[in-house]
Image (cartoon, helix red, strand yellow):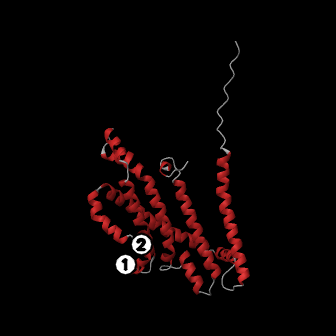
Amino acid sequence: MSARKPTPPDVPDAPPPESRGRALETILLPLATAAAFVAVWDVAVVLSRTDVFPSPLAVARGLGELARKGVLGVYVRDSLVRVALGYSLALVLGIPVGITLGWYAGAARALNPVIQLLRPISPLAWIPVAIVLFGVTNSAAIFLIFLASFFPIVVATMNGVRNIPFMYLAAGRNFGLSAPALFARVIFPAALPRVLSGLRVALGVAWLVVVAADMIAVNSRLGYLVIDSRNAGKRYDLVIAAMLLIGLIGLALNTLVRQVERLRAVRWGFNVP
């Protein structure tokens, strides 16, 4: 009788070549596009012989100057803190309000017209109101960021709850789930993909508004850097540097939320493999 050969240990399958190719493409294509953009920008500045618009090298030197002075990190930190405070407040208040409006038809009939009336108003139009209420302070900027974030979160959460398939609710009730258990195990998980989409939109709008919010408060923010560099000596290299920083940080924030959408609990709602 022949001896039984030992079973080799399981070896995880290597990712298919197509998957590796897509991952590489995801990295290389944006880098190539960014390099082409910088090259076109530099050539355009050289050919136009402009003395106003800065070259990529001048912008890089401006960033280096801010870093040497020790203000670059302070400006970025302070703007991020403002967004974090205003956005977190909108998150804490917006999700419960959206769930209430989505689940209780009477509450939606009472409050939804007011929300739809206020939602289209640009957060920038609230600047005079914010100054009257809070003065030229940090609270005024946080208030503007809160308003910019609150309405997208409420609407996305409300629609997420409203659009839960009836079969999910019926199945939960058939299993005898209590109201709290039905909410925790059916309603909130089913609405979560739409809620996350609203959170991503709200975060983008909040970071967009921070530029205007920075201009009405104290002088250590990215938005203030834009307007101050323009007024104090027409330092357009610092203006463009601040604009690029704002864009890059916005991209990083959006990428962070995208990673949350890849979590197993919610990726079914986004067609994420």
Outermost top residue = 1
Residue at point 32%, 54% (across, down): 103
Please give left or right for residue 145 compared with residue 27 in the image: left
- Badge 2 element: helix
Closer to the camera in the image, 234 or 201:
201
The quarter holding residue 59 reads: bottom right
Task: Kindly identify which residue carries mark 2.
Answer: 143
Residue at point 34%, 71% (across, down): 117
Q: Which mark is residue 133?
A: 1
The mark tally for this picture is 2
Residue at point 51%, 47% (across, down): 264
- Badge 1 element: helix
What residue type is disc 1 on?
Leu
Position in image of residue 31 (x %, y %): 68, 63
Q: Is residue 155 above or below residue 240?
A: above
Q: CA distance from mark 2 to mark 1?
A: 10 Å
Residue at point 66%, 31% (across, down): 9
Q: Which mark is residue 160?
A: none
Position in image of residue 108 (x %, y %): 30, 61
What residue type is disc 2 on?
Phe
Local crowd size for mark 1, using a 10 Å CA cut-off: few (<14), some (14–19), many (≥20): few
| Label 2–label 1 contact, CB within 8 A | yes
The quarter holding residue 110 reads: bottom left
First in residue order: circle 2 vs circle 1 = 1
Position in image of residue 70 (x %, y %): 63, 74
